Image (spheres, grey):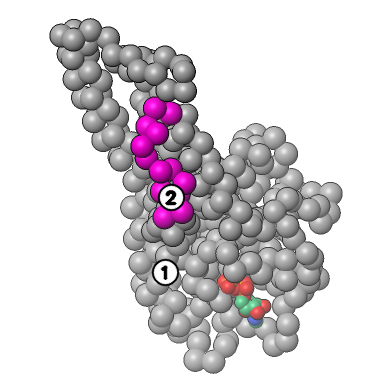
Amino acid sequence: MAVRLVYSIGKGGVGKTTCAAALALQSSVRWRTLVVSLDPAHNLGDVLETRLTNKPSGLSSNLSASEVDMEAAISRYLKQSSERLKTMYHYLKVINLEGYLDALRLSPGIEEYATLQAMEELIREAESDYDVLVFDTPPTGLTLRVLALPRVSVLWGEKLSNLRREILDKRRTLKNIHGERKFVVDNTEHRLPTEEKDDAVMQELNDYVSRMSKMAALQSDATRCRVMPVMNADRLSLFETKRAFAALEGLGMPIGPIIVNKVGLQSTDAGSVEQIGKELRRSVRTIPYYQGELIGREAVEEFARHVDFSQWIPGDTV
Ligand SMILES: Nc1ncnc2c1ncn2[C@@H]1O[C@H](COP(=O)(O)OP(=O)(O)O)[C@@H](O)[C@H]1O
Ligand SMILES: [Mg+2]
């Protein structure tokens, strides 16, 4: 069976990591499970009381965990992009690619693309070794932008393909009038491609659009993917969850019941939990607030006893 995905999503501090760890522990009773933190402010290792790295470490026979090194992921993303640009535009010696990449590192959107790429790589790698892949995500804003990227990128990619097609059309017309254009770079002769099948840029665009379409389809496939929304019973958490739901529904992502965590803390009461279910029009599962520290596997297992986390595992019946 193909690996199934669970995204633990919510505001910073509500309990995303604790819930992701709890779900992973429960899931590992039946399934080969990998839980990965994509949050640049990792605390999955702290919660599980182990030192985690970029490579999955085995915590038990059925459970592994890792924390993605986001700085390294960004560097890898930029390096791969530059390699691709260099092979595609080897004749454009005039552009200073290195300077361009330095600027790109700080550009808006890079963190999102790098996170998406890390996610894609993890899904690919998990395909053969795991049944369930749990993502402990960055706080909501960044996560939603990452999840929206595949769809946005398909639209952009298709527009760029159309532009490229027009360029190739014009090139063909010129070729018919002036003959084929050749040029020499580093003692090698190149021809300017005029057909889609010979054009590296067009091929790159086609690959990109198909990769992004695949990712978008996976994210909206209820048999493969599910969001586990985590929040606390306060107004700010409610407002943010409402906005997140609007975005996730727009992307067609399957959303499981809402976890209202830390119930009993300060101002929260049963009334407001009921209110949350009504306002968000979804079923709610509650987890009480604990005194003391929630660290280590035993504590997380105890925490996990409050809800049946299998209801967020796609393909499992509720
Ligand atoms: N039900 C709970 N009762 C008491 N403390 C909790 C509960 N759930 C989470 N916490 C604590 O709240 C803090 C934030 O939880 P964490 O899972 O790291 O949130 P996030 O990943 O969303 O930032 C941690 O110190 C965690 O131990
Ligand atoms: Mg966290």
**Residue 35 in magenta stretch:** no
Residue interval drawn in magenta: 90-103
The residue at which mark 2 appears reads as 99
| Residue 77 visible in this rendered orientation of the protein | yes
The residues bearing labels 2 and 1 have C-alpha atoms spaced at a distance of 40 Å
**Closer-to-camera residue (215/68):** 68
* Position above or below: 286 against 206: below
Report the number of discs: 2
In this view, 178 is above or below 55: above
Instruction: Report the front residue among 38 and 264.
Output: 38
Dot 2 or dot 1: first in sequence order is: 2
Rendered view: 117 above or below 112? above
Disc 1 marks a residue whose amino acid type is Thr
| Nearer-the-camera pick, 287 or 38 | 38
Residue at disc 1, secondary structure: helix
From this view, report whether residue 295 is shown above or below residue 175.
below
Give the image quarter of residue 245.
bottom left
User: Label 1, on which residue?
Assistant: 241
Tell me if 77 is positioned left or right of 297 in this view.
left
- Judge whether residue 95 is colored magenta: yes
Q: Quadrant of ligand 1?
A: bottom right
On the rendered structure, is 127 left or right of 271? right
